[in-house]
Image: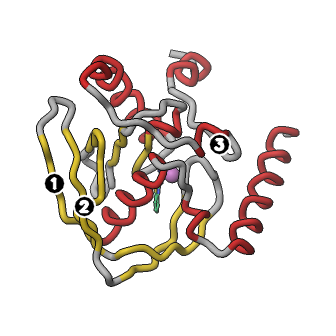
Amino acid sequence: MSDAAAATNTIPILLVPDPRLRAKARAVGAGDADQVRLLAPRMLDAMYKAPGIGLAAPQVGVGLRLVVIDLQKEEKPAPLVLVNPEIVAASEELATREEGCLSLPGQYAEVTRPARVKVRWQELDGSKREVEAEGLLATCLQHEIDHLNGMLFVDHLSPLKRNMLLRKLAKELKAKARG
Ligand code: GNR
Ligand code: NI
């Protein structure tokens, strides 16, 4: 396949300031099963190609509570598909980690969040799952669930840092568009 054809088949990731990144996604219901089964592998594909460790449906313009994650620790894939994920408990202890986002390419900042979270979700078959996460997985789960609520990592920064980063992104995207 040519590069152009491959690019056409990869679902595009929306960039800030696309308003679809700021909308609250709705819960996946029984009537969404077909769409979710088609979309999840396309989201994983876009995530691996980016490459990234997580992707939320609003980042590909779909307002559903659907997330894919693969921390890609060793070389072998370990994809997670999370339907209707929710944080059911969070530690008082906080952790600070550098975050990036595929919707704000090239922008990174330290973000402070709960160090550990308990997250509940459904699998594609509707079965219930729960995990107690720490470290990078805890960060990634919170980052992706934020996307479902129209939140971006920059919203956790001071207004000064947020505006600096958003202006830098706008400038870089403009330069890139000019070539
Ligand atoms: O690929 C990603 N890396 C990352 C690094 C630190 C904290 C969060 C993330 S998620 C990000 C992919 C993305 O934008 N998901 O929404
Ligand atoms: Ni993101």
143 lies above or below 35: below
Residue 179: image location, x then y, percent = 85, 39
Question: Ligand 1: does it lie within 8 Å of the C-beta at label 3?
Answer: no
Q: Nearer the viewer, residue 169 or 162?
A: 162
Side (left or right) of 38 relative to 133:
right
Could you say which quadrant of the image residue 38 lies in?
A: top left
Front-lying residue, 166 or 24? 24
Q: Quadrant of residue 13?
A: top right
As shown in the figure, which amino acid type bears the numbered disc 3? Answer: Leu
Do the residues bearing badges 3 and 2 touch, measured as CB atoms within 8 Å?
no
Q: Is residue 39 above or below residue 153?
A: above
- For the point 19% across and 65% down, the residue is 132
Q: Earlier in the sequence, mark 3 or mark 1?
A: 3
Q: Which mark is residue 130?
A: 1
Residue type at numbered disc 2: Val
Q: Which residue is mark 3?
A: 15
Residue 66: image x %, image y %? 36, 38
For marks 2 and 1 on the same chain, the one whose residue lies earlier in the sequence: 2
Q: Which residue is mark 2?
A: 88
